[in-house]
Image (spheres, rainbow, N blue to C red):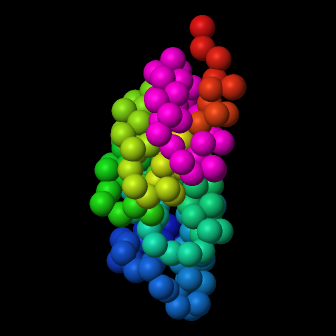
């Protein structure tokens, strides 16, 4: 019954990670530990919907680790949904998570994200594209590099051009 309790907890608290109390975060981490020991595909959208405005980077890294327990074909549809969220932080973390699940289906949306105002969104989309590596990604990186002013984003775009060698 622990898994069902963890899933129920995640369902109830999908949007409460903005400024959570220490007690809440302790409980949240315990629920994630349960799910890490007993992976359940029903948790995939709940895990992705947990990306948001929390400042606890270790939490998001743990969420990514949980997602890596599942086959890519189970995670892709939910990542695509997360990439279309209105929440910049969710979209950034979903774009960053693409690194672990690279697939050409992410290219169009990540390419569009390279044009956004939010530098974190642009940086995360570049890291996601770097993992996909294709001729289309090289063109997107080249075009974005011509406009990009942020040093870190430029660095990832340059890495794409230097390391993404396509036949």
Q: Which residues are magenta?
A: 128-156
Residue 148 highlighted magenta (yes or no): yes
Tell me if residue 87 can be seen. yes
Q: Residue furthest top?
A: 167
Horizontally, is 78 left or right of 134 in the view? left
Q: Quadrant of the C terminus?
A: top right
Question: Residue 12, image x and y in percent?
Answer: 35, 77
Classified by dominant secondary structure, the portion drawn in magenta counts as helix
Residue occupying the point 40% across, 80% down: 16
Give residue 74's quadrant in the image.
top left
Horizontally, is 53 left or right of 55 in the view? left
The relative height of residue 146 versus residue 163 in the rendered view (above or below) is: below
Horizontally, is 90 left or right of 65 in the view? left
Residue occupying the point 46% across, 53% down: 121
The relative height of residue 103 versus residue 89 in the rendered view (above or below) is: above
Toward the viewer: 93 or 33? 93
Question: Residue 1, image x and y in percent?
Answer: 48, 71
Tell me if residue 69 can be seen. no
Residue occupying the point 46% across, 30% down: 143
The relative height of residue 90 versus residue 98 in the rendered view (above or below) is: below
């Amino acid at each position: 019954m622990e898994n069902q309790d963890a899933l129920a907890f995640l369902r109830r608290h999908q949007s409460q990670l903005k400024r959570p109390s220490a007690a809440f975060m302790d409980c949240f981490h315990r629920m994630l530990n349960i799910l890490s020991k007993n992976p359940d595909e029903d948790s995939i959208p709940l895990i992705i919907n947990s990306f948001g405005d929390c400042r606890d980077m270790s939490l998001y890294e743990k969420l990514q680790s949980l997602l890596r327990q599942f086959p890519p074909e189970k995670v892709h549809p939910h990542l695509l949904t997360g990439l279309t969220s209105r929440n910049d932080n969710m979209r950034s973390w979903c774009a960053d998570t693409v690194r672990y699940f690279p697939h050409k289906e992410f290219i169009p949306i990540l390419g569009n994200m390279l044009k956004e105002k939010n530098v974190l969104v642009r940086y995360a989309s570049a890291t996601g594209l770097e993992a996909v590596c294709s001729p289309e990604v090289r063109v997107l990186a080249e075009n974005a590099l011509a406009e990009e002013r942020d040093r870190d984003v430029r660095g990832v775009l340059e890495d794409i051009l230097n390391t993404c060698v396509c036949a």
